[in-house]
Amino acid sequence: MLRDVQSKTSRRPSLVRLTAFALCCCFRCNRIQLPFTVPSLARRDIFAIGAMPLLATAPKTAAASAPSAGECIRDMATKNAQRDPDSAPSFLRLAFHDAATKRSDGQGPNGSIRFELTRNENIGPSLRQALQFIEEIVGKCQVSWADAIAVSGAAVVEALGGPKIDVPTGRKDVTMEDAENRLPDGSLTSGAIRDYFRQLGFSDEELVALLGAHTIGRWTSLLGVQPACMAEEGLKFWICSREQGRRLPFTSRPTLFNNDYFKDVLEFERRQKMPRPAKRYKDRADGGLPALYLLPSDIGLLYDAALHRQVEKFALDQAAFFAAFSTAALPMGPGLG
């Protein structure tokens, strides 16, 4: 009996086949009006049309899950860096300035930078413009300012050719500024540089790697500052000089994250050891050498044997620099931990 049932079942036309057959017949009899123009229609196409109502009722696959908060931030920051690579380094600087206030009192990467733009170290259009885009990220990704700043700092490093640094989210924002005078400045000697980063828990290798962030971006000089501005004092001077001053690149390729910075530091040392010209210094030929725009704190790395060794290592081995930078960035570094 079971065999008879199977036999009858196998001979029973399926609903799909009946629908396709009916449509085919109607189409040939010109009794069906399709809702669109079909120049030529093969039998398999007619079958497909007949199956459409059935396919429409089939269970749909689950929609792709929405991106996580970190993915949303990284995507927006990466696209912005690709669209405007010249502004991208400001996001790394913003992340460091938000994080470098971290001490044992629990301050650090917490979004406080948005209340600190009038401080000397933060004045200028670059951080202000970067923070404006961070506000867009906060609104679209529904994240804290602290997370948006930290993850964006990591994203631009990768977008400009550096290592990928996976940054967790979950930071809480503060509603007031952090303590003052906690950021380094560009005039520090090698000893002062070490003392500063030691209090943050960094080794010589890590602090030199973090200074390697100068491989991208520019710093604001006093070139181009008007005499009236130079006559100002205090906050007024800082504001006008940062707005007017010429921005100089640390390296010849300021939108590429690589080990050029360390090569330039060693190139500065090499030039210092070159024989002095017999004629007056101002009349000497430069030999076509490109200008080096390094800060005193960058040059200070040459006058400490241990730090000098790290500079040499990173100049020869970019992979070693990337590894050390990634390690240093996570605990605090440029605001990524």
Image: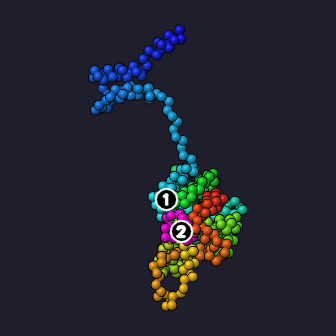
How far across and how far down the image is residue 9, in percent? 47, 14
**Quadrant of the frame with the C terminus:** bottom right
How far across and how far down the image is residue 312, in percent? 60, 71
How far across and how far down the image is residue 60, in percent? 49, 32
Residue beneath disc 2 = 260
Mark 1–mark 2 distance (CA, rounded to whole Å): 20 Å
Residue beneath disc 1 = 81
* Amino acid under disc 2: Asp
State the SS at label 1: helix
Instruction: Assess disc 2: are there few (<14), some (14-19) or many (≥20) residues with their C-alpha within 10 Å of its C-alpha.
Output: many
Please tell me whether mark 1 or mark 2 is closer to you in this view. Answer: 2
Q: Does the magenta stretch include residue 183?
A: no
Residue 49 - label: none
Residue at (30% x, 26% y) in the render: 33
Q: Among all residues in the image, which is located at the extreme top?
A: 1
Q: Among all residues in the image, which is located at the extreme right?
A: 104
The magenta span reads 251-263
Nearest the eye: 268 or 210: 268
